[in-house]
Every structure is written in C-alpha cells, then in structure tokens.
Image (cartoon, rainbow, N blue to C red):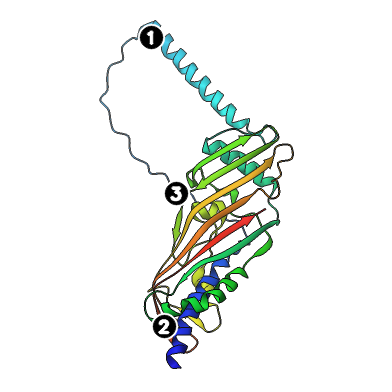
Amino acid sequence: MKQMKRTIALLCAVLLFLAACGRTEQPQTTAPAQTEAAATTEPETEPVVPETAAPQQADADLTAADETEASATEEASSEKAEITLEAGLNSTDVEEVLTFYKLACAQNDVKQYTKTLDLLSLNGGEGKVASHVDVFEPIAKKAVAKNTVTDDPLPGKYADIRPADWKSATAVSDGTYTTIRVQVAQQTDGARGKAFEGPVGRSMTVLDGVDQAVNEMPGVSADFDSGKVEIAYRNPTITVKVDNRTGKFVSGTCKWTYRVEAMLYSLDAKVLAFNVHLQNASGVIDYTVSY
C-alpha cells in the first residue's frame, strides 16, 4: 500500500504539472518593449587624400544615381504605407503580412475566442510509475480538458510581434476577404517562461510561470531550481480570414495552434507527505485558440 501511494504521488505530480499547462494570465499593465542598446565602434582613421577636381559629368552621374536611389526608397516606403484593410493584401512578404495582421488585430482585440487543450500523451518516465500511466491517463485528459475557456482575449501581444518572429507568412485576397497563413518560429522555455515573451509568446501566448503554478497547488511543491524542465512549442501556426470591408475576423475560420511538449528530464517534488523524483517524464498537449 505504501508503494502504491508513492506511485500515485508520482503520477499526481506529473498530472498537476500538465494541468498547469492551461494557466496563462494577462498582464495588468503593458510594459514598453525593451530594446537592446546598439553596439557602437569608433570609426577607423583613414589617411588624408588630397582632394582632386572630379569631372563635371561624373558629378552629374552621381547626382542622378542618388536621385534614382532616393526615388526608389520613397516609392518602396509609399507602397508599405498604403497597406490597408479595405484594399486587402496579396503578399508573401513577412513585413507586409505582419502590417496587415496588426491592422486586423486592432479591430478584433476583444474577448471572443475559445481556448482548448487536448492531452495527447502522458509518459511517467523511468521506474514503476511508467507502468501505471495507462490507468491515470483518462483522469489527466479530463483535468487538462477543464482548461477549455470561452470568451478568451485575442492570443499573444500583436503590437509586439517582430518580423523575425515569423518564419513565413502569406496573404491572399479575393477582393472581399483576405486569408492570412503564418508559420511562427518555434520556441523552447524552462519552467519560468513568460506568457508574452519569445516568438510564440508574442504571436500566440505561451505558458506563464509553470513553476509558480505547480508550487501553488495544495500539497505540491517542486525544486525547479535544481531540476531540468523544458517546455517546447512545436509547429506554431496562425490562420485568419479577414473581411476587407470591416476588418473583422470571419467567424469559424480563425485558428492559432501549436503542440506543447512538457519534458521533465529531472525534477524533485513533494506531493502530500511523499518526496518523489521524476525522471524523463513527459506530456504532449495540443493548444488551440479558435474563432
């Protein structure tokens, strides 16, 4: 019976950790994005070369070239500035698609989204705990499913998304609707990840403070300082369809999704009165926000 209790304690620790995957909190205040100070270098001293009179034709050619380059730059800037919801967008340029996406998000930043979590697998890791996972996996599935929430806010912090956060993006307009498809860069965090940091965090929201969530659960504590925990966000994608006339998302066509792989390579924990050690335990969850 004592060994059975220890086994249950191990499984509960894994289960509670996975249940924490649904915990994300919106910040109360929006902090300005931090920027890294640009590195500066002292210009090298160049030898002084006596000035010589350049031919008048060469000056004219240089002036014409400068004017052409300036004209091309102004034209490119003008094209980017002309991106509007009403005009729709056909583009595979990440910056252009991101500009259009941000314009659309500004028109749809309300609590109207549904977040669902689906536990795909549960692995108890090494030791006797692994042989009992099948018995408790249905319980874990129900616990994770309880994190389904309706009327959730728009995922991510769209204003902070950077072009480098997206691996690829396409926008296709038929004149009435523009459909955007985005492949977000993958992200891996530890147990102290922040909801709106990293490419997936800014684009779609990730788990916020898993260590705190687990330690706040009654009868549970874990040594995340000494443990090794990774939470990976695989295949993060965004698909939205925008009504060009109103800028509104088309209901039933919008989805933000990724696969969460929670890997507990090594973690000492305490569940009730039992000290437990998790070794190579893991869980896989599909995360989806839809509208």
Query: Does any portion of residue 32 appear in the rendered image?
Result: no
Compared to residue 92, the image places residue 238 above or below, namely: below
- The kind of residue on which mark 3 rests is Glu
For the point 54% across and 71% down, which residue is it?
A: 20
Pick whichever of labels 3 and 1 is earlier in the sequence: 3
> Residue under circle 3?
36
Image quadrant where residue 117 sits:
bottom right
Which callout, 2 or 1, points at the residue further toward the start of the chain?
Answer: 1
Query: Could you tell me which secondary element the residue under label 3 belongs to?
Result: loop
Determine whether the residue tagged by mark 2 lies in a helix, strand or loop: strand
Numbered tag placed on residue 133 in the rendering? none
Tell me residue 35's x, y (percent): 48, 49
Q: Residue furthest bottom?
A: 1
State the separation of the CA atoms marked 2 and 3. 42 Å
- In the image, residue 115 above or below residue 237: below
The answer to whether residue 171 is left or right of residue 267 is right
Mark 2 belongs to which amino acid? Val
Query: Residue 215, position in %: x, y?
Result: 51, 77
Task: Give the residue type at disc 1.
Answer: Ala
On screen, residue 45 versus residue 253, left or right, reads: left
Tag of residue 58: 1
Disc 2 designates what residue?
276
